[in-house]
Each structure stands twice: as C-alpha cells, then as structure tokens.
Amino acid sequence: MPHRSAHVCLHCRVSFKHSAHREYRCPRCRRALLLAGDAFEAPPRRDRDAWRVLSVLLHAGLDFRQACCGCGPGYRPRSLREVRERLTYARRTGVPASRALATP
C-alpha cells in the first residue's frame, strides 16, 4: 500500500489522507491543502484553539511526519499558551521559531 500523508485545510478545518505528494485543493473551498504528515491526527472541527495551534505550527514549517525510527514527529505544543510561551522565548533569545516550537 502506498504511503499516505494527511493534508489539511485550515480555513475549513478538515483533513484528508492522500498517497501522492502533489498539490491538492480542498473540495469545500478550493484552497490549497497543506501537508501535515503521516503521523497527523486532526483535532475536532469545533476546537478552534487546536486549529489555531496547528496553523502556527504548519506556518512555522513544522509537520507531523514519522521519524525514521517510527517514534513519531516529536514534541508539538497543544495549547495556545504553550505556543505563546515558545514564541516569546524565540523572540527573546533569537532562536528560530520552528526550533522553539519543537522544544519541550
């Protein structure tokens, strides 16, 4: 079976699994879907805060791909508070946002 990865539409708050890595469009709004990775589990559609956290992570360049050892994508913040703390830390120290967001 081909490798399947999740692609998400942040506007509609939906996720789709596709096997080929090409540009996909949301069937609802026709916007481009963002690649989230093969270890991604979508939050409930009504959980706006979780989707906002996801938006920050994906726009910072983080995704949810399995590591080569199969141990998952590593740490990812789950709340807006954790995201704010890590982004504040990144601004104060000069650490890239993507690295600060991936640090527990």
Image (tube, rainbow, N blue to C red):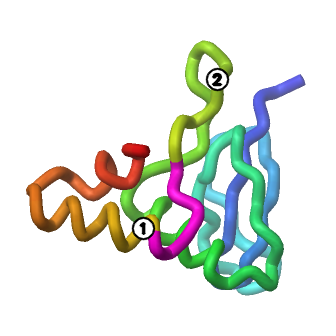
Q: Residue at x 52, y 42 (%)?
A: 75
Instruction: Classify 78 as above or below 48.
Output: above
Name the residue that disc number 1 marks: 83
Residue 82 % position (x, y): 45, 65
Q: In which quarter of the view is residue 70 placed?
A: top right
Instruction: Classify 16 as above or below 49.
Output: above
Element class at badge 2: loop
The amino acid at mark 1 is Val
Name the residue that disc number 2 marks: 71
Element class at badge 1: helix
Label 2 Cα crowd, 10 Å radius (few <14 / some 14-19 / many 20+) = few
Which residue of the protein is positioned furthest toward the right in this rendering?
1
Q: Is residue 73 left or right of residue 59?
A: right
Range drawn in magenta: 76-81
The one nearer the camera, 35 or 21, is 35
Q: Is residue 93 left or right of residue 24?
A: left
Q: Residue at x 63, y 74 (%)?
A: 51
Q: Are marks 1 and 2 in contact (CB under 8 Å)?
A: no
The amino acid at mark 2 is Cys
Q: Residue at x 57, y 17 (%)?
A: 68
- Measure the alpha-carbon separation of dots 1 and 2: 23 Å
Q: Residue at x 70, y 80 (%)?
A: 30
Residue 83 % position (x, y): 42, 67
